[in-house]
Amino acid sequence: MSGILAGEPFGRQRLDQMYRVASERGYRSAIFGEEDTSVTPWILWRHDVDLELAAVRPMAELEAGLGVRSTYFFMTASWFYNLLSQEGRSTVRHVLDHGHAVGLHCDLAIARDGSLADADIVRRVERDFDLLETAYPRMFQRLVSFHNPADAVLQREFESFYSTYQPKFFSDVKYLSDSNRVWREGPPEQWFDPRRHPRISILLHPELWAYPGADMPEGMRGYLAERETKTRAMLEHDQIPLSPTAPAAER
């Protein structure tokens, strides 16, 4: 298992192997906000939900079956999914029922090098938490990961919420990410050495593990095909024609 290469396809089997290797090498899983009181070595498994809810359930189930606890971060206003829909509600409940935590994936909608006053950052985060508390009372922890984080939030701490980009996650914790299906520092398993790296944070996007293929374009083709299938089914359910039809006979 330890010889897994970065170029192998992303998928359930690969994910299963990664979790197992981490466990075999002595790592425990920790939830964001609890790591300071957790016994090392540990891994913070972080999941930013960017594109779809459907990929969340199988990942949460797989982790629970392996004794892994992780933190899922959801958007309140995504272009790609509706957290307030029936699917959104059942997904959040499913994650919590499997022993994981949920937090906010906040999109400040500013450029990477953009600036934003602390008061404005806090105001936008609090607006999202107000919505979450209304829709999901006492379910979401005050944990925040920022979508496409701008310099304004990197290596910063905020009093009213716990950020995954605060200073310690740049110095005391080894950070790895699957962004765009590229392991920029090689496969995670090569970093699973408790003596050298007793504290690790790994960002995994659920949708990147739900579709076959070794690279981002191939995976996104599968995602788009599935999205089209679902959209067509929804249109048909609403009796919206997708092709020219003969005019109805006069009565």
Image (spheres, rainbow, N blue to C red):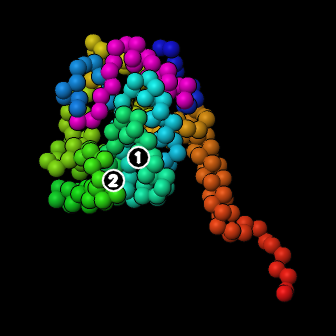
Count of numbered circles on the image:
2
Location of residue 117 in the rendering, given as x and y in whole percent from the top left corner: 18, 58
Side of 10 relative to 187 (left or right): right
Return the residue at label 2.
Answer: 136
Q: Is disc 2 surrounded by few (<14), some (14 to 19) or many (20+) residues within 10 Å?
A: some
Give me the C-alpha separation between circle 1 and circle 2. 9 Å
Image coordinates for residue 80, horizontal then vertical, percent:
49, 55
Residue 16 colored in magenta in the image: yes
Q: Amino acid at mark 1?
A: Val
Residue 182 at x, y percent in the picture:
47, 34
Residue 228 visible somewhere in the drawing: no
Which region is colored magenta? 12-33
Q: Is 155 rendered above or below residue 230?
A: above
Q: In the picture provided, is 222 more to the left or to the right than 94?
A: right
Residue with the mark numbered 1: 92
Q: Please name the residue shown 39% across and 19% down the image.
A: 22
Marks 1 & 2, CB-CB < 8 Å contact: yes
Q: Earlier in the sequence, mark 1 or mark 2?
A: 1
> Taking the image as drawn, is residue 105 in sight?
yes
User: Residue furthest toward the left?
Assistant: 159
Q: Residue at x 49, y 40 (%)?
A: 57
Check the image and report above or below for 70 versus 249: above
Position of residue 228 relative to residue 32, above or below, is below
Image quadrant assignment for residue 42? top left
Label of residue 35 in the image: none
